[in-house]
Amino acid sequence: MAPSALVTELHQSPTSTKPLERLSINAFDQAHVQNACAILDVILRYHLKAPGDLTQANDLDSFKFLALVFDRVKTNQPIRMCLPAFPFKSPNSQNKVLGCLPDMAEEFSLAHINGLCAAIGDIYEPGAELAIISDGLVYNDLLGVPDNNVWAYGQALRSLATARGFKHIKFARLNDLLHTALPEDLDEMTYVANATEFRRLLLNNFSRPNFDPSLEISANQDTCLTYMGYLKFLETDLEHVYPVGEDRSKKRYKKGIGYIAKQMLFRGDAFARAVRERFPTHIRLSIHPSATGKSKIPIRLLPTDSVWTTPWHCAMAVMTDGTIQTAPRSHFDSQPDVFELVRDETGSPKYYRERTDLFSWENAPILAEPLYPCGILIRPAHGDNNLSIEDIDAAKLRALTELNSPLVLRGFKKTDDRDLFLKKAGELGTLMPWRFGILLEVKDLGEESRGSGNSLSAEKMPFHYDGLFKVEKRVRGDGSEEVVSMPPRFQFFTAVTPSPADTGHTLFASSNLLFRYLPPHISLDALKKLTWSVSTPSFGSVNLGGLQLVVQHPVTGKPCLRYHEHWPQSRTHFESTEVSIDGEYGGGQVGEAIEALLYDRRVTYWHSWVKGDLLVSDNTAMMHTRSEFTGGCDRELWRIHVD
């Protein structure tokens, strides 16, 4: 039973004490239970299903996790989760991974789970935090990985999380699991010197002498799933550590892998017991699929449909349209005509990219890297301080934007030169004037912005696409008039001032990702048949009906969402925008599902503006909004619409 169904059961049987006893609730508290269910629903969006569609968590197990969330909600405390993961890179850097340090796969994985926590914070003010408990020292000696490699990997992960602002992720230290005499300022030499002692203490304090891996594999479905996973990955992890040859047959190699896998189960059981004892009030997440869901919630660490879901076992490739692929590096290396290896500024391999000449700009060497969950960040290569807005290849920029929006350009000069900004916009396409002219200064005008919605205020805006209310009257073939919306193809922004920290974000929701995560009861084919209506007193009072909910992209041919978030008077100090979906299919249910997905962190990129940023977004493929910010501050963007 899904968490949202649990609260329905409680609503229908408010006098029944059995479910409430499971949650240890003395009196029925509907608001707290509803909040806890909504939070658990967010976590389950990231669920990693067991193979073969095996039975998932039963009602009692759902209540167990719900109870942990409820205990935090009723005391208004942050939701706490823990994840044993991120041990070290596979020792097979020839065929599986790019090296022994984190790369783009880890970066996307951290962004993915940080987004899980942020999504909880979107609906629950105290927010959430996730503690990563590295199990590297539990297993590394079994795989021939040096202790200092484990240290280097963990330190690099911490640095990456800090550099990228993944503030919801915490990292546990050895002292958090075992009471040891390690110094607070742990360094590499001290860490390595205590690694063997850590393993000894872990097994002495938490292992079960009567734990029989073979018996557990046959009796416990979850243990069997974990064991099968170990066998699968060890076969390639160790192929160069213990190569098959004259001294080792394939049969002996597989027998050795089976032995190591069982040793991992033995140590893993001790590690799991330590985690349960030291993190008793945390929701236990796992990278391993579960057939029962009794003790952990399995989650997918990478936004991919591949079986390669853990970044330390694979490499990552990004297609030109932003689609993520994960596989052993040999898969990408074997297709040099399709994929190229991208290195960072130090020369270290980082990820693979689909080959295209769109990143080769004449006289302007650039670095391009994917943004999570969509879009591309482009910067001058080698820290070049001489490239300006004039050097940007507008034709290739437009082509990239149509494939994977938004395009963020950072580190270019002269981005606040009005004439140069207008000129570059003209190179992107045909400029589309509005009643205010070509260039709009987007800033807080407070009450002065009435009549134009709340776009020129500090208030949060609804999700929308630009140009919905830019209309013109046309004459139909029968002589009657119709009002037609005239949206532009692109938005072109530049940030002429710094934005306040952690506020005033611009959000860009990808139609492609939104449709990927539609709930099972809503199909894309059904959405294509729907129309919607909108009315607002703003913009001279506009009423539009019969608008297609899904349109075809003019270049890629992909389906794109065309919608405006319902924005009643209760949500704004300015004019409301009333939206309804026409037809019989779903009605309000469809609108609610769409609006929830628009804020889904797996779908939407949150942009924090840095002074000098340029940004181009495809106004057909993407929808956007802005979060609130402090009124009267100096936050100012310039925006031009381009066709």
Image: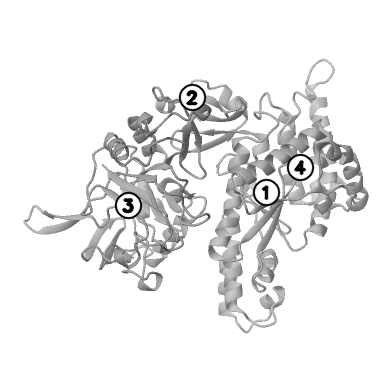
* Nearer mark to the viewer, of 2 and 1: 2
The image shows residue 307, relative to residue 511, as above or below, that is: above
Q: Position of residue 453 (x, y in %)?
A: 31, 63
The image shows residue 291, relative to residue 410, as above or below, that is: below
Sequence-earlier tag: 4 or 3: 4
Mark 1: amino acid:
Pro
Label 2 with label 4: CB-CB less than 8 Å: no
The label on residue 441 is 3
Q: Position of residue 152 (x, y in %)?
A: 74, 35
The residues bearing labels 4 and 1 have C-alpha atoms spaced at a distance of: 11 Å
Left or right, 566 with respect to 423, comes to right
- Asked whether 475 or 125 is in front, the reply is 125
Mark 3: amino acid:
Glu
Quadrant in the picture for residue 254: top right
Say which residue label 2 marks.
338
The residue furthest bottom is 15
Sequence-earlier tag: 2 or 1: 1
